[in-house]
Amino acid sequence: MLEGKDLACVRGERTLFTHLNFTLREGELLLVQGANGSGKTSLLRMVCGLMAPESGEVLWRGEKIGAARESYHAEMAYFGHSPAVKEDLSAFENLDFACRLAGIPVKREEVKGALGHLGLGHCLNLPAKSLSQGQRRRVALSRLLLAKARLWILDEPLTALDQAALKLVQSLLGEHLRQGGMAVLTTHQPVMIPGIAPKILDLSA
Amino acid sequence: MSTSQTVIVLLRRELLLAMRRRGDVLTVLFFFVIVASLFPLGVGPDPKLLRLMGGGVVWVSALLAAMLSLGRMFASDHADGTLEQLVLTPTPPVVWITGKILAHWLVSGVPLILVAPVLGVQFGLSGEALGVLVFSLLLGTPVLSLIGAIGAALTLGLRGGGVLVSLLVLPLYIPVLIFGAGAVDGAMSGLGAEAHLSLLGGILILAFMLTPWAVSAALRISIE
């Protein structure tokens, strides 16, 4: 279970939000909404531990994420604005190294399978600099398939993706949630996942 | 996954990236050679004078060359989001930071050590002095990478970060320069290089133990 308690965010002189509370249980999806600059990305960075909240705390299974760092990071996957794809490495190498560095032992076939699943089977060995923005984001998304994390924190995962990929990501999300996973998501696009009613957290309110 | 495995995977990745971007590595190496070769042109070809200042010149050039490569240590990982992902791995930051610094030394420090004897010969250093020069660089260049990493981490994402790194880091390089060049001097004057080399070794051990923690704290600030 993931909890945010009384979170506040201050950027420079501006207070973006205060007294923010949420709870996320197994199989639930938290949809963070709000205008540009309302602090969605800041909230997500707080939740994954990249940024310290001005006040309040984030709890994972009842423990502060700072104290439970190792177990929390092992169960969490973050997908940020930058896809974390190295231009000089191929799609396969990117994914392989990313998983190994995250401590996930992966086999060659698994990595190929994950990339194939996201429609990148034909550009496994192309350097990432020859891939389009959307394809790079697909490489980053395929990491989610291999990481087997319980909690997905996705910052605008749907931007720069085509219609087919949009459907694919939503079906991946649905599968993840049905298996008891959790997800926190920001997006400006409508998210339709059959059988799942997302919890909505509106930062503009 | 054990810490040594993480470091090995990181090293493999960094070396592969360096192989794909050989230009960056070669730039540093050429800079080193050119700076050292400029001195004889500037001060004149008197062999006695050149022999006297050879060790110091090679050391100063190594310092400047190491400076040049610092900007890249974390900047590209920061720009493409890889750094965030590294921070979010279960591995303690100190472990992968040590790996990154080690990779930086292998890519930009080791080539300098390999070329240094050639430059030393140019300056007419004796065989013994050449040996001491290489050994002092072997002990000293890792310190340059270690201390430089703090500067690189602190100036991450800043405008004009390159200049700021020099201001931050060069003063901290002074002890390394003094003992490194001093060792070569000692070998040439017959006083012996042991004292300088042991001090350099001491600095290396101290830097190896402390700097990854400082870099970890600096990265935490920069990433926020």
Image: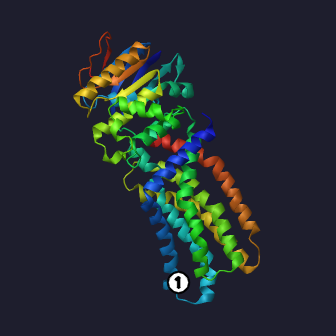
The amino acid at mark 1 is: Pro
**Up-down relation of residue A62 to residue A102 (above or below):** above
Residue depicted at x 47% and y 20% = A150
x and y, in percent, of residue A176 in the image: 40, 18
Residue farthest top in this picture: A195
**Quick one: A109 or B48, which is closer to the camera?**
A109
Please say whether residue A198 is visible from this viewpoint.
Answer: yes
Snapshot quadrant of residue A53:
top left
In the rendered image, the vertical position of residue B174 relative to residue A125, given as above or below? below
Instruction: Examine the rendered structure and indicate whether residue B171 appears above or below residue A131.
Output: below
Quarter holding the N terminus of chain B is: top right
Answer whether residue A51 is visible to the viewer in this image: no
Q: Nearer the viewer, residue A66 or A130?
A: A130
Q: Which residue is mark 1?
A: B40
**Residue at point 58%, 36% (across, down):** B92
**Left or right of B205, for residue A190:** left
Element assignment for label 1 = helix
At which x and y percent is residue B69?
A: 48, 59
Q: Is residue B42 left or right of residue B120?
A: left
Q: Residue at x 30, y 15 (%)?
A: A193
Q: Quick one: quadrant of the C terminus of chain B?
A: top left
- Residue A155, image x, y percentages: 34, 29
For residue B214, what is the image quadrant?
A: top right
The percent position of residue A129, horizontal first and vertical second, equals 33, 47
- Marked residue chain, label 1: B
